[in-house]
Image: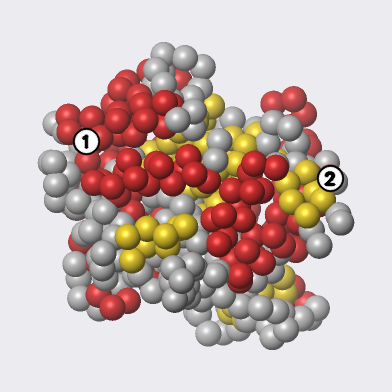
Amino acid sequence: MTRISFPDDFIWGVATSAYQIEGAWNEDGRGISIWDTLSHTPGKIMNNDTGDVAADHYHRWKEDFDLLSELGVHAYRFSVAWPRILPQGAGAVNPKGLDFYDRLVDDLLRRQIEPYVCLYHWDLPQPLQDKGGWPNRALVNDFVEYARIVTRRLGDRVKVWFTHNEPWVTAFVGHFLGEHAPGWKDLGAAIRALHHLLVSHGLAARAIRAEAKQPVQIGITLNLNPVYPASDSEKDREAANQVDMMMNRIVLDPLLKGTSPISESTMASLLTGKLIQPGDLETIRTLDILGVNYYSRTVIKHSNKIPFINVEQVYPPGNEYSGMWEIFPEGLYVLLKRIQEEYLAPLGDSVPRLMITENGVPVPDGVDFDGQVRDERRIRYLRNHLIQLHRAVQDGVAVKGYFHWSLLDNFEWAWGYSQRFGLVYVDFKTQKRVVKNSGRWFAEVVKANGFATD
Ligand code: GCO
């Protein structure tokens, strides 16, 4: 029997986000977010689902934290809802909002589970959207003040902070593809939003370090996909390179090299006025933890389908697919090796810690006659991705932890509740939780810090 074991100090965790699990959308002073606005707009979310109730975590968090203890995880990554803290986005603080997260942090620490706090997982207060949203550079200051207020309350106990979750998704899916809040289709706005998100990361990092009552680690989590050309034709390879620049390098270069590929590209022509101000790239380049959210690869061909962009994603036959994408475990190894060689190795001793902060798969789970959820496809996905992760660690990539997405079935953005990602099944009619077989398998992996591969 072949076993693989991870390094002794390897951190095992699970991840969630506020809007996807909390519910209580208008309770205890919470303000409106852009996702409340979008999900309350008919036709925007599958089945017209909303996050109004979600997994009702706001009321059931103690039961959910019992599940964390049952899984035996070392850490729990969750996000703070900006609209609970500052209902107007700025100005008056909502004490009940701070009290809620204060209780979460205290209970996690009592259970000896490290809180990994993400400040922004897409739920922007609507009043800030009304003043232009992330394409408006003024939001940088609002975000820094929000970060300061949360750190002032939790910074004596929270050691690990993430400023943003997937700034590329916030910027491009929200402002160019239009599938996420605020639902814009404006490439120039997306580019400006991304730059402002990254600048706000750098300035918020300074504010967190200043407000925290102890040394802290500050990170950002990035959705990164290795990009493959659909064929080895020059046009397809060039198309793949362009998508790699627009999806991966556009966040990795500023954060880890202090450069930006925007000026290199045809996108620069879209920028009205001077987007990158003097000092911005130095401000952005601060990182103690690089969080990688990996789900799949991206396969690209040249196409004239989308004007100006001239690329099209294709879905090759041959591999297993899930509810949302191709299952491609090897892509995790390829991605980690590239990050290590192109971005981390040149940094020498000032290299940030590298962690997998999301990895998971949407499969249509159900509760069997005997109350079990036999999600063998998720166990296979988990096993095969952990094998690739271990392969990268063996090849010298210093990955320090793995967080599975997600603890609970939850609101999967534009897909509503149609896609289940949890290690724990949620019956959204009764809010009953059932630990899936994958949850039991994951708990064994955490306990043994490894598993048998055959
Ligand atoms: C993301 C977000 C999560 C998603 C998950 C599945 O990575 O898109 O962080 O909120 O729900 O990744 O798509």
* Rendered position, 445 above or below 217: below
* CB-based contact (under 8 Å), mark 1 and mark 2: no
Please, is residue 408 above or below residue 177 in the view? above
Which quadrant would the C terminus be assigned to in this image? bottom right
Q: Residue at x 54, y 27 (%)?
A: 217
Secondary structure beneath label 1: helix
Q: Is mark 2 within 8 Å of ligand 1?
A: no
Give the labeled residue for mark 2: 394
The dot on residue 97 is 1
Taking the image as drawn, is residue 34 in sight? no
- For badge 2, the amino acid type reads Gln
- In front: 295, or 423? 423
Residue 52, can we see it?
yes
- Considering the numbered disc 2 on the image, is that residue within a helix, a strand or a loop? helix
The crowd level at tag 2 (other Cα within 10 Å; few <14, some 14-19, many 20+) is few
Residue ID at (30%, 66%): 428
What amino acid is at disc 1? Gly
| Location of residue 319 (image quadrant) | bottom right
Going 29% across and 30% down the picture, which residue do you hit?
103
